[in-house]
Image: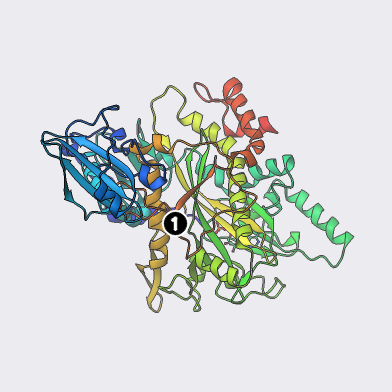
Amino acid sequence: MSDQYVKVQVEQMKSFGEDEEKEGVDTEEQVPGSSPSASVSPDHPTGTDASSTSLPCKQTGKSRSKPGREDKRHTSDVASQGSVVSAEKNLNRLGYERTLQVKGTGKILQRKSEPNGNYVTIHTSKNIEEMRREEGFKLAKKRRPVTVDTSKAKTSLEALKISIKQLKWKEFPLGRRTACDIYWHGVSFHDNENIVSGQVNKFPGMIEMLRKINLSRAVRTMQELFPEEYDFYPRSWILPEEYQQFTTQIHMVKEKDATVNPTFIVKPDGGSQGDGIYLIRDPSDLKLMTGSQAKQGVVQEYIQKPLLIDKLKFDIRLYVLIKSLEPLEIYIAKEGLTRFCTEPYQEPSQKNLSHVFMHLTNYSLNVHSGNFVHSDSQSTGSKRTLSSVLYRLAAKGVDIKRVWSDIIALVIKTVIAVVPELRVYYQADIPPGKPGPTCFQILGFDILLMKNLKPVLLEVNSNPSMRIEHEQEVAPGVFEYVPSPVDEEVKVGVIRDTLRLMDPGHKKATVPQQRASGFEQGEEIPMEEETQEKSQDETGTLPSLCLKQVYPKYFKQFNYLRLVERIAALFIRFLGVKGNMRLGPTAFRTFIR
Ligand code: ADP
């Protein structure tokens, strides 16, 4: 469910005064920053295992030792404490200083050469982690902090502020006259106009692309080309144009088999948070008009047998980062949310069709039911972490590795379905040669698990709510926002780690590698007790990344699906969007048909 834009805008205006004068030019900016590559750990001459190659060497001297002048002697007292797996030395005015890592102890031995040629131990107490942290702090200090314009962040602001603080970056809450490294927009690419450099957290055209009609169209194109691969999206008809088709097909099905009694869910095109959604059992129940205007929307096959937990229907909100369109880079957050209905589920019948708390998992609806359970625990209540739910399913014997791989496949295939048109939008807004920012975006995938554990895509939100507070009824009819630990845990991680991946100083380090991995064998699963990877941040104080690359990691398995993109490339090149963009996304849709 996307944020409710109107509500959001009003709040934003209240809290920030959007038209207030912008902050002046910042004079603190001229920090003598070392180049990004200065943050890369020094290349170590010795050591074969991973730990020894990543060991930072203590550099107290001004110059680094030259190859060929390396002292390879090891002293006997070192050998008596354990075998030495790495050694490093540096020159300073007094002589050589070297650090030695003692295998198995994590300890660093530091030794210094005296003018008489003897080595003297300076200290033996520091372990690798301490050294790494110290080095990290030094490097982080030297680098110019990454600047983030948060003036248009709207409801993501709280989580964003916490993330920026954790990263020790610099926030510009009122915007800035000179360029920032990152612009965080609450709604669309166009929230700030005339950005000519840096990175924006929205792609042009993403909102349009992910509206229910356009998403259904894009997936339909792929269903026609690859029916088996795209069977994770419920059968959908576009309203009003496919109303006749819908009616005819349903009548035919019912005539063939009178016992078949399907249910359909009707969704308005621009709707969110369950607004305007209703269930029907017969095409004649469709409300096609608003006054004299035909309603735009989709009517979709209703999944009648969802997987239940505690007799309740629930769906999964998964956060997905599109780090870049070209080359395509997709990351999935290992932790997500699950949102529970608040009335026990029953298969749809004429009697219960209007029971929204039974059929719709939207938080914004269920929070108003008397049964909504706010919980500080991540594994109870009406909103839980994905890992806690997977843990619970695993305990019941569910093959959650399989479920997780299927979810990853669904995400990659969906992104592949929308990328061609997105590229058309992108070229129209930021044509090659025109100065402009690069883009990335966090999307919210809403996924339902069927009783047979097959994941089904319900929708993709271009503006998933990043609020870390939830509404609570503090007095009858009076709602207030109070902190929500579950939301904070998940959303701060997603925003912070998106920023880490987009860090301009680290761009080179994260350039994708096309490697084929064992997708078929199952994926690393987001489980509660999952062992954490080693922290990769400079300061050593942040947790490991919660975002996991899935594309191009699984390039080999999915690349054949990127057929329409080639057509988009042709369209852009020969017909489309050069110059004044006379032919845009609508023309592209016609073109590919
Ligand atoms: P919105 O953007 O208004 O939230 P969604 O497409 O997410 O619209 O639908 C709202 C809710 O309706 C979902 O969270 C889910 O619980 C339920 N739902 C949507 N589509 C289906 C479907 N095809 N089958 C079963 N339930 C569905």
In what quadrant does ligand 1 lie? bottom right
Q: Is residue 182 visible?
A: yes
Amino acid type for the residue under numbered disc 1: Ser
User: Is 29 left or right of 582, judged from the image as shown?
Assistant: left
Query: Residue 74's spot in the image, x, y percent?
Result: 27, 42
Q: Nearer the viewer, residue 496 or 9?
A: 496
Q: Nearer the viewer, residue 305 or 213?
A: 305
Vertical relation: 144 (above or below) 122: above
Q: Residue at x 43, y 43 (%)?
A: 188
User: Is 153 left or right of 233, judged from the image as shown?
Assistant: left
Q: Residue at x 70, y 72 (%)?
A: 347
Query: Residue 516's spot in the image, x, y percent?
Result: 59, 40
Q: Residue furthest right?
A: 256
What residue sits right under mark 1 in the picture? 465
Vertical relation: 263 (above or below) 571: below
How many numbered marks, from 0 up? 1
Vertical relation: 383 (above or below) 122: below
Query: Residue 79's spot in the image, x, y percent?
Result: 30, 49
Where is residue 491, by image quadrant?
bottom left
Q: Residue at x 17, y 32 (%)?
A: 62
